[in-house]
Image: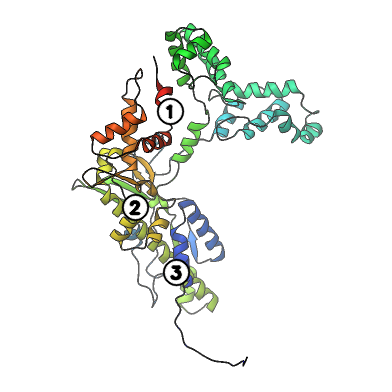
């Protein structure tokens, strides 16, 4: 083989650092973007970030924007109108804490419990142990780990500073103290114990004593059968009549199996939406960007002046250019999010007016064609971006769903079908609940072809039990 050197000319498409940065920023959530900006500003002194989300839009002074390669950008227009005193309802999210369009305030479960503990007269040992138990709570509000294992992790602390290791009685006293706090059922070690604690609290208020006693019997001895057995079989198993069992089941349904859930919902509600939707003057729903989704950015005027006057080295000039690239890419990110959001709102006008039943089927390709973007770009935009609407706060991906065919050659979205199934089941006769086949037949009558197994899949996704488990006699 002969070895030789040759030269050739070819063209190759490469991503510039600026384009790579733009793509990366586009797929970041609000929190991740803020972390990215904080890391960038720590390395680049020319980019300044306000300490708090101020509600102001991105802006640069005219002096900072002077550059032969960039024109002055109107950041106020790029970001759009702010999220002023506007409140959305629905989706189970509590927005009562929203003030002046800012983030929704919330208190964590741990902080709520500590506020109650602060008012108790406890010994140092009990207070420390109670704090350990509070920190051990899982996302549902349960203490899943064995108490002995939790105590072993802090054995040295109790031995050296608190007069010796905890005994089993002290461990149980701390657990009972935790379980006596609000919300009811907190600190339980099992679902059964959680429900029993809540039923115990109901005994202090005026309720049907017989129904309460029956509920305690069902939870204490027949919890596995509740929801699995037909009502008649459950009555025979516990030896109670149907009316009393029905009353007991109503009590049990009113309990909270996950005591920490409302605090989780408050935490979820504290997210800052990227886009808000409101009804325009022309009667059409319109989307606009939220100012609160981005921190206020600016270029350090003193450094910019030194560079402009030629009193700095090339390193600062490079930092200035990088800062301007960052500002430009963030503005482009905002414009892309707004463009995609406007296309989604334009396509789903009926949803915002009539609710989930009116959701039309839509895939990424539909929005990509409307916005003249690639599907991968739309996918990045809709990932971890949220839209605040009168119906609630939704991730942009929520508006994309699969579809089934109709008799006239059209299509119905899976979201609309789920909403219809939920409405039918909510209005059904509990003595004769609708089976999956009956639901499928109803869709057939409306000209929508939905197989029974598809109905079952949608019903299970809604966490609705089967007809046999919903039946009440």
The reply to whether residue 214 is visible in this rendering is yes
Please tell me which of labels 2 and 1 falls first in the chain: 2
Describe the element under mark 3 as helix, strand or loop.
Answer: helix
Q: Position of residue 412 (x, y in %)?
A: 28, 43
Q: CA distance from mark 2 to mark 1?
A: 29 Å
Please tell me which of labels 3 and 2 falls first in the chain: 3
Q: How is the image coloured?
A: rainbow
Mark 1 = which residue? 465
In this picture, is 244 found above or below 2? above
* Foreground of the two, 252 or 285: 252
The reply to whether residue 81 is visible in this rendering is no
User: In the shown orientation, is residue 8 left or right of residue 69?
Assistant: right
Q: Residues within 10 Å of mark 1 (few under 14, many from 20)?
A: some
Q: Position of residue 183 (x, y in %)?
A: 53, 25
Q: Position of residue 411 (x, y in %)?
A: 27, 46
Q: Position of residue 307 (x, y in %)?
A: 48, 75
Please tell me which of labels 3 and 1 falls first in the chain: 3
Can you tell which mark lies on residue 65?
none
Q: How many marks?
A: 3
Closer to viewer: mark 3 or mark 1 = 1
* Foreground of the two, 104 or 409: 409
Can you tell which mark lies on residue 19?
3
Mark 2 = which residue? 363
Q: CA distance from mark 3 to mark 2?
A: 26 Å
* Foreground of the two, 232 or 377: 232
- Residue, x 54% and y 92% (percent of image)? 6
Q: Residues within 10 Å of mark 2 (few under 14, many from 20)?
A: some
In this picture, is 8 found above or below 300? below
- Residue, x 46% and y 16% (percent of image)? 249
Closer to viewer: mark 2 or mark 1 = 1
User: In the shown orientation, is residue 217 left or right of residue 343?
Assistant: right
């Amino acid at each position: 083989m002969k070895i030789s050197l040759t030269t050739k000319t070819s063209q190759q498409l490469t991503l510039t650092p600026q384009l790579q940065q733009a793509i990366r920023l586009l797929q970041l959530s609000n929190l991740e973007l803020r972390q990215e900006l904080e890391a960038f500003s720590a390395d680049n002194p020319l980019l300044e970030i306000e300490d708090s989300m101020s509600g102001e839009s991105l802006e640069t002074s005219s002096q900072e924007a002077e550059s032969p390669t960039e024109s002055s950008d109107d950041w106020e227009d790029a970001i759009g109108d702010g999220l002023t005193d506007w409140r959305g309802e629905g989706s189970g999210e509590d927005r009562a804490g929203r003030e002046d369009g800012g983030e929704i305030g919330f208190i964590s479960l741990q902080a709520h419990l500590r506020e109650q503990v602060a008012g108790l007269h406890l010994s140092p040992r009990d207070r420390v142990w109670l704090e350990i138990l509070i920190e051990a709570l899982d996302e549902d509000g349960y203490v899943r780990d064995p108490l002995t294992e939790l105590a072993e992790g802090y054995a040295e602390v109790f031995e050296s500073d608190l007069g010796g290791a905890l005994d089993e009685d002290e461990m149980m006293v701390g657990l009972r103290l935790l379980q006596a706090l609000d919300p009811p059922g907190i600190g339980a070690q099992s679902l059964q114990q959680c429900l029993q604690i809540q039923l115990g609290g109901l005994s202090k208020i005026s309720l049907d004593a017989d129904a309460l006693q029956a509920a305690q019997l069902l939870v204490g001895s027949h919890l596995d059968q509740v929801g699995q057995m037909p009502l008649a079989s459950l009555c025979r198993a516990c030896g109670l009549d149907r009316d009393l069992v029905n009353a007991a089941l109503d009590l049990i349904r009113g309990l909270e199996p996950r005591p920490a859930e409302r605090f989780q919902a408050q935490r979820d509600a504290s997210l800052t939406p990227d886009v808000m939707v409101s009804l325009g003057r022309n009667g059409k729903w319109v989307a606009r960007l939220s100012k609160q989704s981005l921190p206020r950015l600016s270029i350090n005027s003193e450094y910019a002046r030194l560079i402009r006057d030629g009193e700095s080295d090339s390193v600062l000039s490079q930092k200035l250019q990088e800062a301007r690239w960052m500002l430009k890419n963030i503005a482009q990110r905002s414009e892309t999010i707004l463009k995609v959001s406007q296309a989604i709102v334009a396509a789903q006008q009926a949803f915002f007016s009539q609710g989930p039943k009116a959701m039309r089927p839509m895939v990424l390709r539909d929005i990509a064609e409307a916005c003249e973007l690639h599907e991968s770009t739309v996918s990045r935009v809709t990932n971890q971006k949220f839209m605040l609407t009168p119906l609630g706060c939704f991730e942009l991906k929520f508006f994309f769903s699969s579809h089934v065919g109709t008799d006239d050659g059209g299509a119905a979205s899976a979201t609309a079908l789920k909403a219809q199934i939920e409405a039918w089941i909510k209005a059904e006769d509990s003595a004769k609940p609708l089976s999956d086949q009956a639901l499928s037949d109803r869709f057939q009558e409306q000209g929508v072809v939905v197989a029974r197994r598809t109905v079952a899949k949608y019903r299970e996704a809604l966490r609705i039990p089967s007809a046999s488990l919903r039946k009440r006699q």
